[in-house]
Amino acid sequence: MKKRIAIFGSTGSIGTQALEVIAANPDKFEVEILTAYSNDSLLIQQAKQFNPNAVVVVNENKYNAVKDALAATDTKVFAGEKALEEVAAFDTYDMMLAAIVGFAGLKSTLKAIETGKAIALANKETLVVAGDIVMQKAVEKRVPVIPVDSEHSAIFQCLIGETRNRIEKVVLTASGGPFLGKKPNFLVNVKKEHALQHPNWNMGAKISVDSATLMNKGLEMIEAKWLFNLQPSQIQVIIHPQSVIHSMVQFEDGSIKAQMGLPDMKLPIQYALTFPQRIPSSFPRYDFTRSSSLHFEQPDIKTFRNLALAGEALHRGGNTACVMNAANEIAVYGFLRNRIGFLDMTELVERAMHKIHFIENPTLEEYFESDAEARNFAASLINL
Ligand code: NDP
Ligand code: MG
């Protein structure tokens, strides 16, 4: 039986790579749902190739274009933000690949969990914002949440067969991004063109900027906490510029397991789609005989202060990470539109974290309110 997949965010970096994996394994997967924000031409092309049951284009201005282009097919076309949740509740698919970027992916992912679908999770912000509620719901509904993020996929793979064994710590590796080793006097002048040039990965704009500021690793610490039920003291970040070790787990006997491979997101995407099985792939292989040495160093959290802010959010809990994430989304948006400088992003996040009132055990509604408050506050600071 083919696994029926819904790709939320199919026109993005993760979404398109997932479709490559699916296209290479037509006997294993069937595409049921595809969604985009406003890239109608790519969504139409994908729908024609994969013949899904439904597509959603969130931007309602694009509805007619998509509807007309797919009029001769069986694909149902929906538009608007609400449609994401409605389609997520369909019972015609088995697994959602959650690959929308940002807070915008939370509601549809929750709906998929509520209606019993397995989740392949790329959208880390879902766990950063409301990890307690999302993971609780997944336990309640007995649905697996399988990480796609390469570090978390690595940890997940290292933990196979270790259910009864205590984790001493996990070590999240970070490439360091394009500005590794740089100091604030350099960073103050960097532009988005530089920040978008990641040395090892080709990703969407938001996560590329997050990688350059190290906020991505900060978000990943919080993602790890919720996925693997860890204490803050069990999560370590180490810079590893080659991105060959994707992350590690150290157990209480001192033994360390690492998962390795060339940096290629198709591998963790494929693993999440086929888990618990592995299937053959033609992805390039890592060659120990030709590789340079693997290098590790401490992150410079004085320069890349986002990592320290995320550490604060991790320790403080409550709505702090939700607020941090919202302010960061606004900051990245402002930076990508040349409204603020590279270092201003951290400033904005820090001010929002200290401004928005703390809630220790937020309800889902309170997470939404904290997100909106932090977004409005951050936007007001940069006149968005
Ligand atoms: P992209 O920006 O490349 O793609 C984002 C996708 O989400 C697109 O399909 C986009 O549609 C859609 N989208 C954007 N905004 C909205 C919105 N408000 N509502 C609904 N849909 C929206 O992002 P990535 O693929 O790089 O990242 C996706 C997620 O995966 C992120 O959470 C990221 O952190 C995570 N991730 C990504 C990795 C990577 O290698 N790229 C690695 C690990 C994790 P449209 O194209 O129409 O704008
Ligand atoms: Mg990652």
Image (spheres, helix red, strand yellow):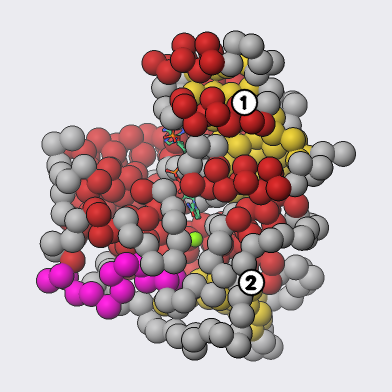
Asked if ligand 1 lies within 8 A of label 1, the reply is no
Is residue 185 shown in magenta? yes
Residue toward you, 83 or 291: 291
The image shows a total of numbered marks equal to: 2
Q: Is residue 72 above or below residue 92?
A: above
- Residue 212 at least partly seen: yes
Write the residue at 33% across / 35% down: 372
Q: Position of residue 367 (x, y in %)?
A: 43, 39
Q: Amino acid at mark 1?
A: Lys
Dot 1, how many residues are within 10 Å of its Cα: few (below 14), some (14-19), or many (20+)?
Answer: some
Look at mark 2 in the image and give the residue it sits on.
285
Q: Is residue 234 above or below residue 348?
A: below
Q: Is residue 295 above or below residue 79?
A: below
Q: Quadrant of residue 237?
A: bottom left
Indicate the secondary structure of the residue bearing disc 2: loop
Look at mark 1 in the image and give the residue it sits on.
48
